[in-house]
């Protein structure tokens, strides 16, 4: 079901709205302006009440719509949305950004049907974090705080809120400190098991150390140094629906070139100059799912990064798909990005906490 089919422009007439509702499987439409800002909703009941009150079929929907529709913000955890469906009895819920623009619509009938038993979450927390020295000389990067929580704590809380209960954490550098802080995971509502890397195995190599019986499941791999609104459960659902060898969470990024770009042909003839262009690109967001067959590409206890595993899978004819994240995403890779998040996005006065 294409969620855009459930949008209705504010100037649509009662006659046209009635026809659109008759064609709608969920019998609910969402009224927007030209910028896709959510203004209201329209149901069968709204139409019936208006028909009883007036016979003017040219009346605009904005005059009789429900002006207080149920919606959620981008990044709302799956379990919270599922609870809202249950409590409200609605069949569709718009997901809106900070400007109240609709980014997608969740439909009750097609909400994820996966079970967490089919996925094994593994958080990669073994790196040294050299770009964050001197902070990481005595503190492992996953325990660096952004706002009121550690980096790894934020990711564990999101896994918990998405319904996961069993999680593996792969550790090496200052691993005892991570283990001491996380414990058995009960403070996050999780049961944490540890993979101890004897030497650093990169962002995928430690998967080879998982118990053999778990390698027959889909493995959800997460970098520990991310601050994001990626829904793990939606990525899992995407993976089950499309059945690729690897599913990658992706993020849209704008690249700005601060110079005039020359457009040249093979003879170096300049045909145009573009002043300070910008481009939208999709980047790998550090969260992925690998199917059981991909584990055979991972050598036992050898260093392997996820980018290498992705390349190997593609080279061997595997199917790799990307799933776009709509919410915020930050890679806390250095002290500059950490300072930025703590001073602006996650400052004491910010609502993002």
Image (spheres, grey):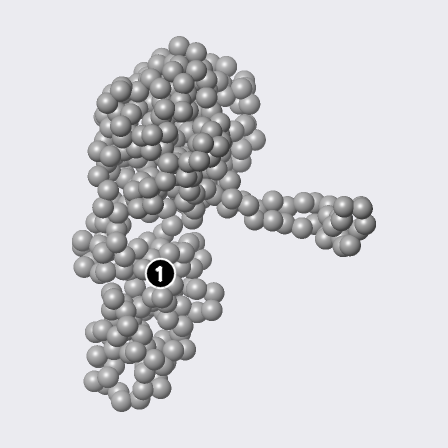
Question: Mark 1: few, some, or many residues within 10 Å (few <14, many ≥20)?
Answer: few
Place of residue 80 in the rendered image (x, y in percent of width and height, measured from the top left)? 26, 47
- Which residue is more in the foreground, 220 or 68? 220
Q: Position of residue 272 (x, y in %)?
A: 76, 54
| Residue at 34% from the left image edge and 80% from the top image edge | 16
In front of the other: 168 or 10: 168
The quarter in which the N terminus is drawn is: bottom left
Residue 82: % across, % down? 23, 49
* Residue under label 1: 2
Q: Residue at x 48, y 37 (%)?
A: 284
Instruction: Between residue 345 and residue 204, name the one nearer to us.
Output: 204
Is residue 294 at least partly visible in the picture? yes
The residue nearer to you, when weighing 214 against 284, is 214
* Residue 241 vertical position relative to residue 330 in the rendered view, above or below: below
- Residue 191 image position (x, y, % from top left): 23, 25
Q: Residue furthest top?
A: 198
Task: Work out whether residue 156 can be spotted.
Answer: no
């Amino acid at each position: 079901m294409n969620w855009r089919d459930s949008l209705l422009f504010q100037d649509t007439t009662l006659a046209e709205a009635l026809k659109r509702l008759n064609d709608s499987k969920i019998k609910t439409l969402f009224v927007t302006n030209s910028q896709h800002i959510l203004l209201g909703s329209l149901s069968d009941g709204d139409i019936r009440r208006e028909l009883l009150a007036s016979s003017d079929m040219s009346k605009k929907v904005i005059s009789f719509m429900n002006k207080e529709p149920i919606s959620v913000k981008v990044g709302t955890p799956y379990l919270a949305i599922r609870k809202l469906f249950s409590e409200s009895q609605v069949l569709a819920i718009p997901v809106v950004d900070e400007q109240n623009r609709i980014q997608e619509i969740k439909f009750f009938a097609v909400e994820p049907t996966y079970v967490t038993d089919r996925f094994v979450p593994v958080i990669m927390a073994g790196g040294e974090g050299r770009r964050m020295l001197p902070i990481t000389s005595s503190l492992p990067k996953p325990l660096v705080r952004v706002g009121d929580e550690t980096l790894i704590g934020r990711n564990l809380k999101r896994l918990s809120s998405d319904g996961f209960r069993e999680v593996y954490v792969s550790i090496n550098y200052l691993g005892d400190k991570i283990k001491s802080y996380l414990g058995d995971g009960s403070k996050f509502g999780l049961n944490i098991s540890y993979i101890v890397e004897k030497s650093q195995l990169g962002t995928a190599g430690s998967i080879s150390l998982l118990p053999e019986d778990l390698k027959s499941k889909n493995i959800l791999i997460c970098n520990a140094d991310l601050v994001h609104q990626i829904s793990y459960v939606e990525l899992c659902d995407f993976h089950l629906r499309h059945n690729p060898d690897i599913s990658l969470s992706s993020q849209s990024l704008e690249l700005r070139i601060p110079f005039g770009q020359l457009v040249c042909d093979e003879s170096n003839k300049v045909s145009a100059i573009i002043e300070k262009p910008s481009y939208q690109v999709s980047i790998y967001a550090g969260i992925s799912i690998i199917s059981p067959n991909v584990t055979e590409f991972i050598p036992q206890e050898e260093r392997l990064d996820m980018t290498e595993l992705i390349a190997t899978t593609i080279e061997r004819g595997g199917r790799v798909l990307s799933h776009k994240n709509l919410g915020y995403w930050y890679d806390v890779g250095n002290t500059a990005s950490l300072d930025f998040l703590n001073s602006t996005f996650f400052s004491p006065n910010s609502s993002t906490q």
